[in-house]
Image (cartoon, grey):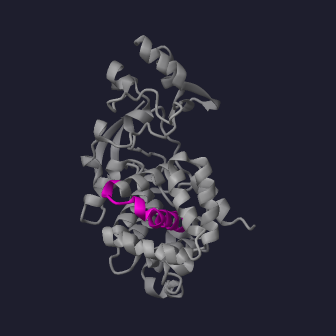
Amino acid sequence: MTIKDTFLSPDYYPSFSCKGPDCRHTCCNGLTINMSQQEYFKLVGLSCSDELRQGLDLAIKPLSNPDPYKYAELCHDFFGNCRMLMDNGFCRLQYECGEDVMTYACRYFPRSPRLNISPRVACSCGCEKTIEMLMDSKENISTTSGEYSFDLAGEEVKSESVTKDELEKIQNYLFEILQNKDIDIDKKIADIRAFLESQDSQDYQNYATVENDTDQHFSDHENVANSFFKSINICTFVKIAEFVKDQYYTMADYCDAFLQVAESDDPLDTLKANRDKLYSTFPELDTWICKMFINDIFYTQFPFSEKDMTLSQAGQLLECEVRFLQMLLYSNVDNISSRDDFVDLCMYYFRMADFTPFSHNALVLMNKND
């Protein structure tokens, strides 16, 4: 069905364009591509060359518990690549049969139109071009509205628990904190977690009273934010890194580097030295991290991205995701000699965070007592 509406988006969205064959890590690389029942039968009965038919027959697999909107998937080959990917970086399906036969996921990624709360669209940080655009911009991220049309498998069910105003009020407050140049990233994360925790004990529709008295409300959390290296629990992140290494092959080498640091005589001292080295190469590191998480908050509709997650848990999760990314970056400093290296690590990180059960599993591991 065709959806045409006025969508709210980050300011970069209208100028986003795919890098095509210049992309180092195409959408097909490491991502599961789901399709609707309608798309499945279109591809099964598609008139095409013998070479493409063989690839489709090997790639298309119905899911074990299908529904009309998530019916089958395109399976990767042994190397983790989509079987439709040509050597020149183009999609064989699109090249031979045109864009109209492509799945919704392939046609629009990294764009993600959402309609369950209000019409919104953004690009995932699981795309290197998205991260590059965020890094290139010298201004704070803002939002804009535009009319867009999408051919979707179906329209999302409207949320009965969250309104447009509730989502925007909380997100705008989080964006204000993350883009505040007067406080460091550690203070920002502590303030966001404290704010979200406070909303579980009151109606978050009335959170404006907190916004008007920020300094007083968060004064108890200033000591928490004084130092990244005093607030993290290495053992917790070791559990997360070991899990990620086993589950997500694109993150395995990055996690190995962190686990080696964690096993050193003084892991926090090693992380601090590596952090200083990385900052000397990328002085805007904290700004880039904040921009990526602002975009991810908008993209995933955080803190309402998980149906059964409380706002306190959302704050805990965001802190975990930011800290884990920081530690992976610091641990891999010897492998991050260029901007492309930095983008690659972050891109794979957000592919894991946005498109796998990582968030749920990270929360479980964080609260697991050995």
Query: In the rendered view, would you say 61 is above or below 289?
Result: above
> Left of 270 or right of it: where is 111?
left
Q: Which residues are magenta?
A: 319-340
In front: 360, or 161? 360
Against 303, residue 110 (above or below) is above
Q: Position of residue 13 (x, y in %)?
A: 30, 49
Specify the quadrant of the image occupied by residue 366.
Answer: bottom right
Q: How many numbered circles does the render carry?
A: 0
Q: Which residue shows up at 49% across the image and 21% down it?
A: 56
Give above or below for 191 relative to 262.
below
At a point 37% along the width and 24% down the height, the residue shown is 92
Q: Nearer the viewer, residue 258 or 325?
A: 258
Dividing the image into 4 quarters, which one contains the N terminus?
A: top left
Q: Position of residue 84 (x, y in %)?
A: 43, 26
For the question of whether residue 99 can be seen, the reply is yes
* Percent of width and height locating residue 113: 41, 44
Q: Give the image quarter of residue 133.
A: bottom left
- 152 relative to 266 in the view: left or right: left
Q: Which residue appears at 41% of the width and 52% of the height?
A: 347
In the picture, measured across the screen, residue 271 lies left or right of residue 342, that is: right
Q: Where residue 200 sits: x, y (%)?
A: 60, 70
Image quadrant where residue 46 sits = top left
Q: Residue, x 28% and y 46% (percent of image)? A: 16
Q: In front here: 109 or 237?
A: 237
Secondary structure, magenta segment, majority class? helix
- Judging depth in this view, the residue of 62 and 244 nearest the camera is 244
Say whether residue 356 is left or right of residue 92. right
Using the rendered image of the protein, determine whether residue 309 is visible from the camera's viewpoint: no
